Image (cartoon, helix red, strand yellow):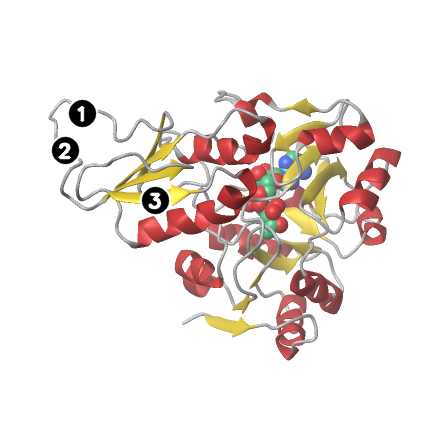
Amino acid sequence: MTRILPVAGPADAAIEEAAALLRAGGLVAFPTETVYGLGADGLNPAAVARIYAAKGRPATNPVILHVADAASAQTLVSHWSPEAQRLAERFWPGPLTLVLPASGTVPSIVRAGGPSVALRCPAHPVALALIRATGRPLAAPSANRSQHLSPTLAQHVASSLGEAVDLILDGGPTEAGLESTILDLSRGRPCVLRPGPIPPADLEVLVGPVDLWEGAVRAGDRQAAPGMAERHYAPRARLQLVAPGSGLPETPGGTLFGTSGSVAYVALGTLPPLPPGVRGILLPLDADLVGARLYALLHELDDAGCERIFMERPPEDEAWLAVRDRLRRASAKEQP
Ligand code: TXA
Ligand code: MG
């Protein structure tokens, strides 16, 4: 069994133990304010290679380096722009990842061979204490098998990665529930590669107009960023989006979804009438609350053996951008 250590706060003895494991090249999963990360010493290529192996992650998909402050971030880039400075001052620690031109200190495997590095300072006392105790930037993708749902609980990490991780620090449920906003500052106009808890409008106040990478808003066949595969963040159950209030879609045979008990319907705001046997789940019509709850709910439905999930399409406004993005990816067709 993978070891799971509860950690009460930044002074907990578990943090020093985890830091020692990381310095020795081990893998430690830890809580952040977004989702759990699978951490390794970001300056040790062999340790980072273990992350890729544990996740089954393609070598073409770079990882984020987590730092404790902007000063550490500056040692990892070749150019720290005024925009980066303003954003870091305003949003760090917090769920914003900045993509910047990498300095020579960043191992190639972290960048997947590319010229840039993604940096983030997480707003979680345990994550920050762990980075400081280790004394290195921590490479940390979400702590799940590649293409699967991100973990918002320590238990999700254990069931997705099992023995592949040396230690899991359990800091309880994560707060934001969706991964950080990723902003590319490494070329031309700033571009949001992945929508997240910080909406583009909040970034624009500081850096002027930002682009939204088209793959982040609608299905596309090109990948701007290596990790932006269309199907991603997906539950095992088949997820299908439906119009709000529509109830279960009609099926040619009639009662296909009526009795099996393996079908769930997730409503936003109001639960419509549903056939017997269908598990109805009501979420509030509030983007932050749905974001915080979404992955945990999909994990629960998977664990309950649910085979099909129908979920109401969220509203079109910007507040729902990150939730829409994750739902679109989670419901995309499996790629060969
Ligand atoms: O909230 C988060 O960001 C979480 C927590 C653990 O910090 N981390 C996370 O990491 O979501 P991951 O690896 O699951 O997703 C990071 C994304 C990937 O899609 C990757 O392709 C992209 O960031 N990325 C990493 N480095 C990049 C780079 N240099 N240029 C463009 N995209 C990059
Ligand atoms: Mg991920």
User: Which quadrant of the figure contains the N terminus?
Assistant: bottom left
Task: Using the rendered view, name the quadrant where residue 47 is placed.
Answer: bottom right
10 Å crowding of disc 1: few (<14), some (14-19), many (20+):
few
Q: Residue at x 75, y 65 (%)?
A: 132
Disc 3 marks a residue whose amino acid type is: Ile
- Helix, strand or loop at label 3? It is strand
Residue 236 seen anywhere in this rendered image of the structure:
no
Q: Residue furthest bottom?
A: 13
Separation (CA) of disc 1 from disc 2: 7 Å
Sequence-first disc among 1 and 2: 1
10 Å crowding of disc 2: few (<14), some (14-19), many (20+):
few
Mark 1 CB lies closer than 8 A to ligand 2: no
Label of residue 256 in the image: 2
**Disc 1 + disc 2, Cβ < 8 Å:** yes
Q: Is residue 248 left or right of residue 42?
A: left
Residue 200 seen anywhere in this rendered image of the structure:
yes
Q: Residue at x 67, y 75 (%)?
A: 16
Q: Mark 1 = which residue?
A: 251
Q: Mark 3 = which residue?
A: 281
Pinpoint residue 234: horizontal percent, then vertical percent.
41, 40
- Helix, strand or loop at label 2? It is loop
Pinpoint residue 119: horizontal percent, then vertical percent.
72, 45
- Helix, strand or loop at label 1? It is loop
Sequence-first disc among 2 and 3: 2
Pinpoint residue 252: horizontal percent, then vertical percent.
14, 22
Q: Residue at x 62, y 71 (%)?
A: 18
10 Å crowding of disc 3: few (<14), some (14-19), many (20+):
some
Q: Nearer the viewer, residue 101 or 125?
A: 125
Separation (CA) of disc 2 from disc 3: 19 Å
